[in-house]
Image (tube, grey):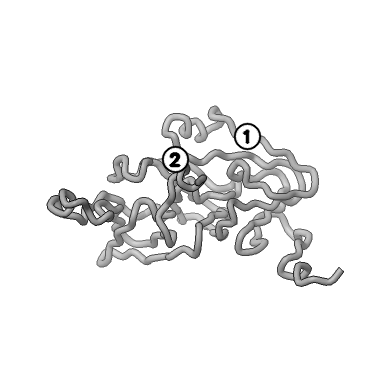
Amino acid sequence: MNSDLFAAENMAEPATAPGMTQQNAKSIKYAVNGECYARQGAMIAYRGNLQFEKLGQGVGNFLKRAVTGEGLALMAVRGQGEVWLAHEAANCFILDLTPGDGITLNGRNVLCFDPSLSYEIKVVKGAGMVGGGIFNSVFSGHGKLGMMCEGNPVVIPVSPQAPVFVDTDAVVGWSSTLQTSLHRSQSLGSMLRGGSGEAVQLRLDGEGFVIVRPSELRSEKAAGN
């Protein structure tokens, strides 16, 4: 059978080493030899001898999810084989963390990660209840992290001389060394006249970067319409 469908860039090749690789712009392949962690429901295909287990709320840091309401529901993928992971055709990226690196990600942007990475849920300082949530997932250590973003992300450098202000509904993540606070860019008079729609932002100070998506997050209800 002949078709562009069978072009090399669309074909899945056997893994040459354990771990995470980019299958294409919309999916990540993980060659499992032991276990990895991924968001629940992200598996689109697999081959080999793999088992998928929901990580309960009593497992280590995952207990915090019940307390905080953090929206990252995880599963463990165990065994030997290959699993393909994706979520709603979002763009996928692999971050390779080394000791000393750290990144804070919104739970909705986490796709998968190596078990060697340290993972915890932390409060976003200064954010209050802005955006409907105050907790993010913080990753550090040595290993790979698969993240996703609707559309092409914008990565903005942050320096002590140039803090960055981001919409809380558009922010994906930032260097964990950055300091966060709440910033109001709208006057009381403007708010009383109906507002500009840009009243409150998250301010990031320090040295690092922030990742934003090219649109504001839709609510779950709106997304289902």
Callout 2 amino acid:
Ile
**Crowding at label 2, few (<14), some or many (≥20) Cα neighbours within 10 Å?**
many
Instruction: Using the image, tell me which numbered label, if any, was put on residue 96.
Output: none
Q: Residue furthest front?
A: 225
Is residue 80 rendered to the left or right of residue 122? right
Give SS at disc 2.
strand
Circle 2 is placed at which residue position? 121
Percent x, y of residue 29: 68, 56
On residue 54, the disc is: 1
**Residue 219, percent from left and from top:** 43, 45
Residue depicted at x 21% and y 51%: 194
- Residue positioned most to the left: 189
Tell me the crowding category of disc 1: few under 14, some 14 to 19, or many 20 or more residues within 10 angstroms, Cα based: some
Q: Secondary structure at mark 1?
A: strand
Question: Where residue 189 sits in the image (x, y, percent)?
Answer: 12, 52
Q: Is residue 200 left or right of residue 101?
A: left
Q: CA distance from mark 1 to mark 2?
A: 18 Å
Q: Marks 1 and 2: which is nearer the front?
A: 1
Which residue is rendered at x = 73% and y = 58% of the image? 17
Check the image and name the residue furthest to the top: 58
**Kind of residue indicated by mark 1:** Lys
Q: Is tag 1's residue or tag 2's residue first in the polypeptide sequence?
A: 1
Front residue of this view, candidates 160 and 83 = 83
